[in-house]
Image: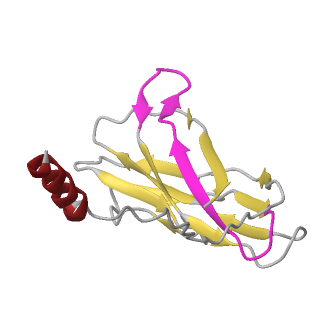
């Protein structure tokens, strides 16, 4: 019996003491940004003007910058551009000091008579910074380019450009 008692005493002395649970906290900052809904409008159209194919022998790219400056692709005398050009103007309004992302999606331009298509590439800003809350908002324009080939047919080519804005 003495041997058993000594063993129990030895076991209880070797067992570590269990500490009472200690409560700890880890505070974190919580934030919420509340913004106005975006207001978005567009005015105008994109117009490349009239393009004369004068025996075109190689691909040529015609572009209109966001400042409405046309580049006729350096193809003269094979390519002659004339007539008025234009680029659309967009206006976005929302919460001051917020960055707005701009996503531009072009469709192909389709020949109204034959159904032939021209691919269009868009240029312009990918973001704008709102510098006020509400009116007058921020204006921006987009430009674009089309490539004509020696097999491009005559006719009126038309399509659409979809522009989407969202807070970043």
The residue positioned 32% from the left and 54% from the top of the image is 60
2 versus 153 height, above or below: below
In the rendered structure, the answer to whether residue 134 lies left or right of residue 148 reads right
Residue 104 colored in magenta in the image: yes
Quadrant that contains the C terminus: bottom right
Q: Nearer the viewer, residue 112 or 129?
A: 129
Nearest to the observer: residue 33 or residue 104:
33
Query: Where is residue 163 shown, x and y percent of the image?
Result: 63, 48
Question: Residue most toward the top?
Answer: 114
User: Residue at 80% across / 61% down in the picture?
Assistant: 35
Q: Residue at x 72, y 60 (%)?
A: 89
Q: Residue furthest right?
A: 135
The quadrant in which residue 29 appears is bottom right
Can you see residue 68? no
Instruction: Report which quarter residue 134 is drawn in.
Output: bottom right
Query: Viewer-proximal residue, 156 or 162?
Result: 162
**Residue at horizontal 56 percent and vertical 25 percent from the top:** 112
Span shown in magenta: 93-118
Residue 54 percent location from the top left of the image: 36, 49
Q: Is residue 3 left or right of residue 43?
A: left
| Residue 81 appears in the rendering | yes
Location of the N terminus by quadrant is top left
Counting from the top left corner in percent of width and height, residue 49 is at 59, 53
Residue 63 spot, x, y in % from top left: 46, 60
Residue furthest out toward the front: 1
């Amino acid at each position: 019996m003495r041997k058993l008692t000594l063993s129990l005493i030895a076991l209880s002395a070797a067992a570590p003491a269990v500490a009472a649970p200690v409560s700890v906290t880890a505070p974190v900052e919580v934030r919420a940004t509340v913004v106005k809904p975006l207001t978005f409008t567009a005015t105008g159209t994109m117009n490349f003007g009239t393009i004369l194919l004068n025996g075109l022998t190689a691909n040529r790219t015609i572009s209109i910058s966001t400042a409405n400056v046309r580049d006729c692709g350096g193809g003269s005398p094979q390519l002659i551009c004339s007539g008025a050009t234009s680029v659309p103007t967009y206006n976005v309004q929302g919460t001051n000091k917020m960055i707005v992302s701009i996503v531009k999606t072009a469709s192909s331009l389709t020949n109204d008579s034959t159904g032939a298509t021209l691919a269009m590439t868009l240029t312009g800003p990918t973001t704008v910074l709102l510098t006020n809350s509400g009116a007058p908002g921020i204006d921006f324009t987009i430009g674009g380019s089309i490539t004509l080939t020696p097999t491009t047919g005559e006719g009126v080519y038309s399509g659409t450009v979809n522009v989407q804005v969202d807070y970043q």
